[in-house]
Image: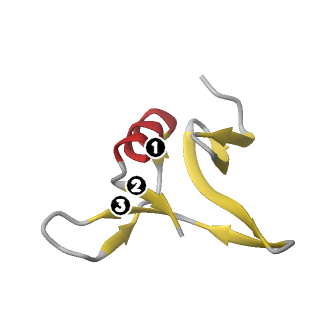
Amino acid sequence: MIKDGWHHIQGEDVYVVNGFVQRGMKCINGDYYTTHPYRQNKGDSSATIQSNLTVAAFTAGIRRGSIFMV
């Protein structure tokens, strides 16, 4: 099990609590922004914020392209 705190997973900096991805951070032009995991809706161009994704689900979703950080 991954320990609580900041981790670099699949190219994303994410904060993990009790094995679940809570939020992330991105650095754009020297400024840091909070990001959240979103999942692409099936048959739709919209996305839904995902709370309490396990690290395994987050990793698989990022690899598949169905989860992204915004």
Q: CA distance from mark 2 to mark 1?
A: 7 Å
| Residue found farthest to the front | 29
Callout 3 touching callout 2 (CB < 8 Å): yes
Quadrant where the image shows the C terminus: bottom right
The answer to which of marks 3 and 2 sits earlier in the sequence is 3
Return the residue at label 3. 39
Q: Secondary structure at mark 1?
A: helix
Return the residue at label 2. 67
Q: Amino acid at mark 3?
A: Arg
Q: Secondary structure at mark 2?
A: strand
Quadrant where the image shows the N terminus: top right
Residue placed most toward the observer, 4 or 14:
14
Q: Amino acid at mark 1?
A: Phe
- Rate crowding at label 1 as few (under 14), some (14 to 19) or many (20 or more) other CA atoms within 10 Å: many
Q: How many marks?
A: 3
**Looking at the rendering, which quadrant does residue 50 occupy?**
bottom left
